Amino acid sequence: MHILFVDDDPDIRTLAIRAVLQEFQDAAVNQASDLVFLERALHERAPDILVTDLDLRWTDGFAVFDRVKAVNPHCCTVMFTGTGNEELAVKAIRHGFDDYVVKGTHQLRRLAMAVRAAHDRNQELRRHSENRELVLKELYHRLHNNLQMVISLLRMTEKTIESERDRVQLADLGRRIQALSALQEEFYRSDDFRRVNVAGVLDRLARNLVKLAGGHVALSCDLEQAEMQVDVAVPFGLMVNEIITNALKHAFPDGRSGRLSIRLARAQERLDLTITDDGAGDPGCMGREGSGLGMRLVRRLADQIGAEVSYERNATGTTCRISLPT
Amino acid sequence: MPDQPSNVNGRLRVLVVEDEWLVADYIVDVLEEAGHEVAATAATGEKAIEHLEQDAIDVALLDIKLKGSLSGIDVAQAARARGIPHVFITGSGDPTTRASAEATGPLGFLQKPFSPEGLMAILAGPTRQEKAHGN
């Protein structure tokens, strides 16, 4: 346990330290009365508890808070100030301080109790957070295992079906489940479960599909960094999965070599994705507005996220454009 | 450089280590359809190590979380000690687990749910390399 006291007045620091140490008898203490001391203290050891004044000659309590939290985001923080009013108390709490105590002779005991309560509360929150992390890991593991079992069941079912066409449909369903699962993993890996870097997602998705197709198609990706909300990114990823899978299947049949280019660019309040192949472009290929399930999925998913999809075929191949609002 | 499957004619003798029979069955089916031979399947690390010791195995496919006291990472270390290459197939996305698994030098890492093509790509890569080198 390491406690840092920041105050210009050495007498106040001494009194505050004495009071707080009654609650934390084994704690190590550091003090700072200017920037050099603060940096030295932080360098020596990240504090577990910060007690800081608001008005300092060299900075203010909010800046000290920010600096300490940068070193230890879990640090428990209490403002101990002489300039007490409700407005400031609210500001301190909103900034992230765990508590706020107004200075005064009879307030030292209150400071010690406030620090103890804030510390215990923080510990409890951390325990909750760690438990939540464990549950999340277990859920993730279960989800992926269960999806694998679904895929296994699909394959077992596939074996019992005589119709080649139905078997292909079932195998495609398995691939769609895998694509969904891969997208899910991107969110698990991202810092924020609600948003994801879509350039990274597309890059991995395209590389994986091209690799699985046998590696006879060269892939070039020119992807601008862009973040996307999960409720848009999942349908968007599934659309791209369908379009690339379709291109690989129909534009480059029977191991034919060629090139697939993917470009993601941000325009005014829109995100534009173009997927271009230089393949055979037979009537089954990516460009057709066919009646296949894949193309139907693309159209319905596009409607869901307000995206516009267009196809263009010429002598050199097919281009699919997806434009969606950001 | 991880150990690589020794079989160069494309047919590998594979040890499948997976504690969900449904998933093990799927892996076996995928392997056999691709022309490989399943030397044995095991649901625990202890059983897997017995097979590593007793059977002729070219490559081991390992789930990480297993029934019993040993994990797939323990089995990987045993395989590594015998010069048998291994591939992880796991549902875990935990970076710490993944780092421990990577440290054993696997041929590849497949995230569940995986496709038959994904597994074949990992098994085919080194075999192709060996052929190219005329081994």
Image (tube, rainbow, N blue to C red):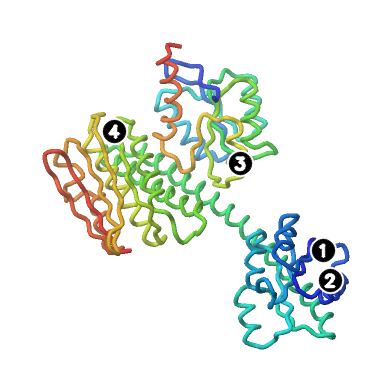
Chain identifier of the residue bearing label 3 in the image? B
Q: Earlier in the sequence, mark 2 or mark 4?
A: 2
Please state the horizontal and vertical placement of residue A166, each as a whole percent of the image.
28, 42
Q: Total of numbered circles in the picture?
A: 4
Does label 1 lie on the same chain as label 2?
yes
Q: Which residue is mark 1?
A: A29
The foreground one among B10 and A165 is: B10
Under mark 2, the amino acid is Ile
The foreground one among A8 and B61 is: A8
The foreground one among A182 and A156 is: A182
Which of label 2 and label 3 is nearer to you?
2
Does label 3 lie on the same chain as label 4?
no
Q: Earlier in the sequence, mark 1 or mark 4?
A: 1
Q: Left of A147 or right of it: where is B79?
A: right
The Cα–Cα distance between marks 4 and 3, rounded to whole angstroms, is 36 Å
Under mark 4, the amino acid is Val
Which of label 4 and label 3 is nearer to you?
4
Q: Based on the displayed image, in which of its 4 quarters is residue B100 positioned?
A: top right
| Residue at screen point 66% across, 68% down | A64
| Residue at screen point 14% across, 41% down | A283
The Cα–Cα distance between marks 2 and 4, rounded to whole angstroms, is 69 Å
SS category of the residue bearing label 2: helix
Does label 3 lie on the same chain as label 2?
no
Please state the horizontal and vertical placement of residue B52, each as a whole percent of the image.
62, 23
Chain identifier of the residue bearing label 2 in the image? A
Under mark 3, the amino acid is Lys
Q: Which residue is mark 2?
A: A17
Please state the horizontal and vertical placement of residue A108, each as a whole percent of the image.
83, 80
